[in-house]
Amino acid sequence: MLEEAVAAARVGGKLAQITEHWSPHINLGMPVLIPDTYIPDLNLRLSIYRRIAELVDKEEIESFAAELIDRFGTLPDDVQNLLKLVEIKQFCRKAGVARIDAGPKGAVLSFHPSTKIDIAKLMQYIARQPGTVKLRPEDQKLVFIKAWEDLSQRLRGVHRVLQELAGLF
């Protein structure tokens, strides 16, 4: 709160439009890295990670993937997973999802405390998927019961779920 007050004082005392910065925590149980066999130079690899962290939309991700292919060759699966994770992270922020843990039997999503959830839309979404999606009353976590044994299937499934949720709010 003190940081917000200081920031507000610097911009003329307006506290209303201070953007909250948070990053979703995503655990899909899969490697999401740049292998040193793809980019051997550590400093270059670190700079690529920094650039990936700054990507903001699907077009930028696709453009960056094309640049990587031009510079280093075909993307390894781990790098493709990393770029897909960046897109998932963007959907998480749009949907207000602070944490997602996914595994072979589905996923559990936690909403960020500042998320404004339209309960009616969320309940309609849950109702359209009987038996596969539920809201746990004890902790307000959204549980998806899915068979995602295969890692690529899990990645696609989580991507689809978060894209749908981002469209709700």
Image: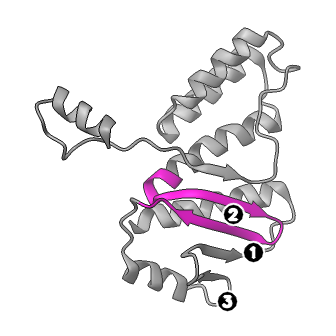
Numbered disc 1: secondary structure: loop
Quadrant of the rendering where the N terminus is positioned? top left
- Which amino acid, mark 3? Gly
**Does residue 49 appear left or right of residue 126 in this picture?**
right
Give how far apart the Cα atoms at labels 2 and 3 are: 16 Å
Numbered disc 2: secondary structure: helix
Crowd class of label 2 (few under 14; some 14 to 19; many from 20; radius 10 Å): some
Q: Quadrant of residue 47?
A: top right
* Mark identifier at residue 131: 3
Q: Is residue 97 magenta?
A: yes
Please name the residue shown 38% across and 83% down the image. Answer: 120
Please name the residue shown 65% across and 20% down the image. Answer: 48
Quadrant of the rendering where the C terminus is positioned? bottom left
Q: Position of residue 74 (x, y in %)?
A: 79, 27
Please name the residue shown 51% across and 66% down the image. Answer: 164
Crowd class of label 3 (few under 14; some 14 to 19; many from 20; radius 10 Å): few
Q: On the image, numbered disc 1 is attached to which residue?
A: 146
Crowd class of label 1 (few under 14; some 14 to 19; many from 20; radius 10 Å): some
Give how far apart the Cα atoms at labels 3 and 1 are: 10 Å
In primary-sequence order, the first of circles 3 and 1 is: 3
Q: Is residue 106 magenta?
A: yes
Picture layout, residue 75 above or below residue 131 = above
In primary-sequence order, the first of circles 1 and 2 is: 1
What is the magenta range? Answer: 92-113
- Which amino acid, mark 2? Gly
Give how far apart the Cα atoms at labels 1 and 2 are: 8 Å
Identity of the residue furthest to the left in this view = 12
